[in-house]
Image: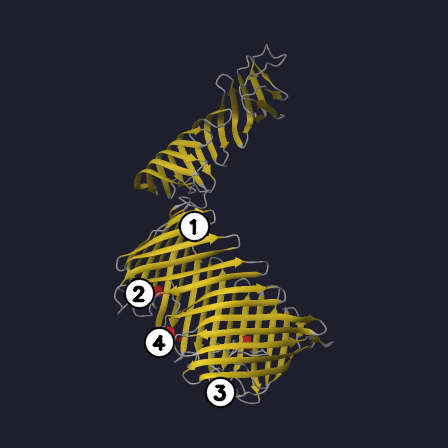
Amino acid sequence: MARILVGVLGAVWLSAVAGAAAAQESSLQETLRIEGASRDEPLVVIADQVTYETDGSVARAIGNAEAFYGPRVLGADRLEYDQGTERVRAIGAVMLRNDDGTLLFADEAELSTTLENGRIRQPRALIAGGARFAAVEGERIDGRYTVLSKAVYSPCIVCFDDPTPLWRVRAAKVIHDEVTRDIVYEDATFEVEGVPVLYVPYFRHPDPSVRRRTGFLAPEFGEDSNFGYSVKLPYFIELSPSRDLTLTPFITTKDGLIMEAEYRALTRTGGYRLRGALTYNNEQKGTGDEWRGALEGEGRFSLAEDLGWGFDIDLATDDTFLRRYNYSDEDRVTSRLFLVNETDRLFAEANAYYFQSFRPDEDDDTIPMALPELRMRYRALEDQTYGVANLTADVLHLQRNETRDVSRFSTGATWERQFVTDLGVVITPFGQVRADAYWIENDPVRGNDTELRINALAGVDVRMPFIAENALGTHIIEPVVQLVASPNDGSQDDIPNEDSLNLNFDETNLLIGESRFAGNDRFEAGSRLNAGIRYDFTNDSGVGVEAVYGRVFRLDDNDAFAPTSGLRNADSDHVGALRLSFDPYFDVTARFRADQNDFDLERREVYARASYGPVSAVGSYAHIAEDAFGGFASDREEIAGAAIVRVTEEVRLYGSARHDLEDGRLVEADGGVIFENECCYIDFSVSRRNNDDRDAEDGTNFGLTFRLKSLGA
């Protein structure tokens, strides 16, 4: 049957249709337009059939009936309009969609013709974000308030076999304000699995559609061997649409109050975040009462299309504050202020660094502050015929409270050009020249000194990949040879080494023609041959194999490298790696460095990742031989791993551990269980740390986070 449109205006009266006076009811077969002017827009009704009484007092829309007034929609099996009361009655499968998208369901409702006011029997409400209400009776007031009597609220989805939600709130009255987006309860009782646990006479919270609102956040409970039982009670303050502040009293039974604060802001040019903690106690051994705290944060801002600036802050008042209160296990932190300009050819930045050490054997007065560090890299040439050339320059000043201060200016240029022969041989000649000037003050060995040096090299990289395809997949074998000519500068001890202390020689830096040192204070002088071979296999099933092996050969020893680096002797140690993968299920990488003479393993590492069904895991193993120059006074060997297991759609188990095989002790471990569904989040965790550091002693920590979803914003 055709659907018919009926307009009903403000002070509605129904016109009789010619030829229908003799019938009590007559079926309408065309659009019925009702005149009136008490409202600015009509109530539009669509139904399979519309009838009216001959006296014009009642109109009925029957079958898939829907009424529209602006953004509001009323649907039911049948709608009836009474001219005398100017009310619309909805009967059977009633649904009302309000201005904010809230949905009300009921068996029967009686509303004004603007759908703003009225009463509803057995209402059920669904609010944007997942909130669900059920009540004995409801009322719509001013198109703004939904008032439910004897109501139940819960975001939990229930099934027919178990209709009791995990948690709910029962209240004598629930009011939903669609303008302020608040939900207000009167005489409310919280229930868990149907059991009452808490009564409050009055309670309110934002509805689930609110993303940010001032108020308390979910608390966190814990117990730690160092500071006892604890609770965190975060209070969120919305300062503006782009700024907020969270204040968190961190209350402990042993150490008293630690006050935490986090401030976040978005600006027209970027954004920043600052987070800090502060307490006053005497828990640091041998110090007495004192203020203790930490501050960390970051900011990123744009000044122009290619120009920006920012900062990173990581500070603490003393060595053990971060570890004692489980903020961080870092033993060195860095704060930075920077300005950066980056285009397709130019990268330039200015930095200021402040370093802080928490190691007991390091004095902050001997740790430098870098102010300034200026770096520039400019691509002066990029041409298929003439190759690629880059110009570099940097300035650095290191200032200490005690001992050595160093200033450095460096400039240089690099060039390379790639050729591919008809046989597929890839030949890349390259070159580099660099000049450095150093000004040294208060060095306990060198005194005050000025040093100048120039280093240059020229080389060629030759690669010839062999590619074969068969039923198994694609195979690539690629031998690589790099021949580098450079003056043998001998000892570089006249210049202090500030930025090139640690060097891990492995397959990742085997084929670097310029220099393997990360910084400028040391360079790789002397002629050498870098030789390696790579094998790669892939197929359509996701199976992959990659193997790399190589060595470095020199004319002379190079004293710039530490004796334990594997690169000091004329013939280097052996380095290699093997990677196996079966995407997306697992991949494992093993790398090694073996002594040049007897092939004893000086360093071996294994890293693995696996994911299958509900289980995801990562693991690692590392053995590093004694290296006094690298900071290892004895051999180091440890194994570590972490895993997450999804037991069900709602339950996840997680855990991680790190074990020192050399000392035979568990360094740290943690684990827990997470229960999460549409209505709540529960995380119970336990961790153990076995690494005493003054007042950050070995300890066990228990934690509990419990959050009721949709209850607040």
Residue at screen point 61% across, 80% down: 433
Q: Label 4's element?
A: loop
> Which amino acid, by three-letter code, is at mark 4?
Asp
Which circle, 2 or 3, is nearer the viewer? 2
What is the quadrant of the N terminus in the image? top right
Bin the neighbour count of mark 2 within 10 Å (Cα to Cα): few under 14, some 14-19, many 20 and up. Answer: some
Relative depth, front residue between 686 and 211: 211
The disc, 1 or 3, on the residue closer to the chain's N-terminal end is: 1
Location of residue 174 (image quadrant): top left
**Real-space Cα distance between discs 4 and 3?**
36 Å
Q: Residue furthest top?
A: 22
Measured along the vertical axis of the image, is residue 165 above or below residue 113? below
On residue 361, which mark appears?
4
- Residue at numbered disc 2: 699
The disc, 2 or 4, on the residue closer to the chain's N-terminal end is: 4
Bin the neighbour count of mark 4 within 10 Å (Cα to Cα): few under 14, some 14-19, many 20 and up. Answer: few
Residue at screen point 49% across, 87% down: 598
> Which amino acid, by three-letter code, is at mark 1?
Asp
Which circle, 2 or 1, is nearer the viewer? 1
Residue 454 image point, x, y percent: 57, 83
Measured along the vertical axis of the image, is residue 105 above or below residue 349? above
The disc, 1 or 4, on the residue closer to the chain's N-terminal end is: 1
Q: Label 3's element?
A: loop
Q: Label 2's element?
A: strand
